[in-house]
Amino acid sequence: MFDLMEMDKTIEFRGESFPAWHGSPFDRGSADSSYSRPQDPHYWPKGTYRGERVESADMTMAELRAYFAGYEYNEQFGGKKEW
């Protein structure tokens, strides 16, 4: 079940606060970077792989900005999955 407490999770990056709950645009951007996947803006509003995936064409500018910030954040501070 999706943890509503996680909805409050945020990450500060480049002077902006981004929602970073599991499945959020920031989280998905970070995950795509972590797994060395190409940028593909999307998110899961009910948590990763729950409900309907929201594609880039249906994302707001703020959601797209959060996705790309998550990708850049992981490129700068995160790790890469080693297979």
Image (tube, helix red, strand yellow):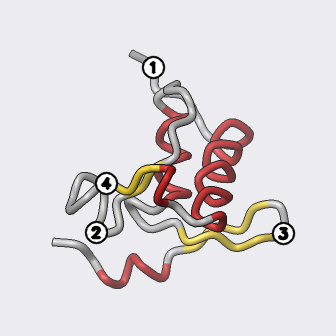
Give the class, few, some or many, for how many residues have Cα within 10 Å of label 3's Cα (few <14, many ≥20): few
Q: Position of residue 43 (x, y in %)?
A: 42, 56
Please, what secondary structure does the residue beneath circle 2 have?
loop
Q: Which residue is mark 1?
A: 82
- Per the rendering, the mark at residue 53 is 4
Determine contact: label 2, label 3, CB under 8 Å.
no
Q: Position of residue 30 (x, y in %)?
A: 55, 46
Identify the disc placed on residue 46: 2
**Tag 3: residue type?**
Gly
Circle 2 or circle 1, nearest the eye: 2
First in sequence: mark 3 vs mark 1 = 3
In three-dimensional space, the C-alpha distance between marks 3 and 1, rounded to whole angstroms, equals 30 Å
Q: Residue furthest left?
A: 1
- Kind of residue at badge 4: Arg
The structure residue drawn at horizontal position 39% and vertical position 61%, both measured from the top left corner, is 22
51 left or right of 17 in image: left
Amino acid carrying label 2: it is: Lys
Among numbered discs 2 and 3, the one appearing first in the sequence: 3
Determine the residue positioned at 65% across, 48% down: 68
Q: Nearer the viewer, residue 54 or 83?
A: 54
Q: Residue, x 77% and y 71% (percent of image)?
A: 16
Q: Is residue 68 above or below residue 19?
A: above
Vertical relation: 44 (above or below) 3: above
Q: Are marks 2 and 1 in contact (CB under 8 Å)?
A: no
- Mark identifier at residue 15: 3
